[in-house]
Image (tube, rainbow, N blue to C red):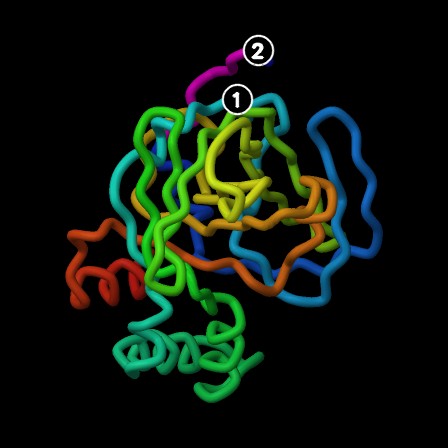
């Protein structure tokens, strides 16, 4: 796929909420574009030209990562949900916390990525796989918002390592990721693209609780 012009960072910053609304009705697939059923919000970059999207390598997500679901369960993210509730008439604090509880929920506590390898720490065990990039999908919602998922398929590794992995991190060109939402499982990519409600979210393993809260409040 052809590389496109670099999208300026300050432009991206205008359109990087953790979650944006989407209410689409149908799913269709072309080489790189999909429209996906959902009545919920979806963590994606909201607006861009399709021609601005380019391929990315697994190295954009290389490093050690941890799920922020434990922070939600401990109450550490309550200030984030309270602030969202103050700024929104759609949900109160309890509704936001419930929504993110579904979104962040995962038993995979850690992710390690190095070269073509992704390791998943689930239920106190590591599962490892080698993954090959197979392209991206542009998701277009009825609301007009859009997003991109970058798709990787397992080519070798442990049986329990997921077959399909999809990254969503608000970026549409090659750049080191600061945090990401991960969709993964043993279904096909087309089936996994239908998942809109659960998007486990990972930050660097070195990130402190206060830095995670600050990022979520100001992202």
Prevailing SS of the magenta stretch: loop
* Span shown in magenta: 2-8
Q: Nearer the viewer, residue 21 or 107?
A: 107
Q: Is residue 58 above or below residue 5?
A: below
| Quarter of the image where one finds residue 79 | bottom left
Q: Which residue is mark 2?
A: 2
* Disc 2 to disc 1: CB gap under 8 Å: yes
Residue 2 placed where, x, y %?
57, 11
Q: Which residue is mark 1?
A: 54
Residue 48 placed where, x, y %?
57, 35
Residue 27 placed where, x, y %?
81, 46
| Numbered label attached to residue 128 | none
Task: Give the residue drawn at x 39%, y 38%.
Answer: 118
**Residue 6 colored in magenta in the image:** yes
Label 1, secondary structure: give it. Answer: loop
Using residue 15 as the reference point, say whether residue 39 is left or right of it.
right
**Residue 149 colored in magenta in the image:** no
Using residue 148 as the reference point, say whether residue 195 is left or right of it.
right
């Amino acid at each position: 796929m052809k590389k496109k012009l670099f999208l300026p960072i300050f432009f991206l910053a205008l359109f990087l909420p953790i979650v944006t609304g989407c209410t689409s009705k149908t799913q269709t697939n072309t080489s790189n574009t999909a429209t996906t059923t959902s009545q919920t919000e979806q963590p994606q970059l909201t607006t861009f030209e399709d021609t601005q999207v380019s391929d990315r390598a697994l190295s954009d997500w290389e490093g050690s990562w941890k799920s922020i679901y434990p922070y939600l369960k401990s109450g550490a993210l309550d200030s984030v949900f309270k602030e969202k509730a103050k700024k929104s008439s759609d949900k109160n604090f309890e509704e936001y916390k419930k929504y993110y509880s579904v979104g962040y929920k995962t038993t995979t506590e850690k992710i390690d990525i190095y070269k073509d390898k992704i390791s998943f720490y689930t239920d106190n065990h590591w599962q490892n796989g080698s993954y090959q990039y197979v392209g991206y999908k542009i998701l277009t919602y009825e609301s007009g918002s859009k997003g991109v998922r970058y798709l990787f398929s397992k080519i070798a590794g442990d049986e329990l390592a997921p077959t399909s992995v999809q990254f969503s991190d608000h970026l549409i060109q090659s750049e080191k990721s600061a945090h990401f939402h991960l969709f993964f499982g043993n279904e096909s990519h087309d089936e996994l693209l239908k998942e809109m409600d659960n998007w486990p979210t990972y930050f660097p393993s070195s990130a402190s609780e206060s830095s995670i809260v600050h990022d979520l409040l100001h992202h």
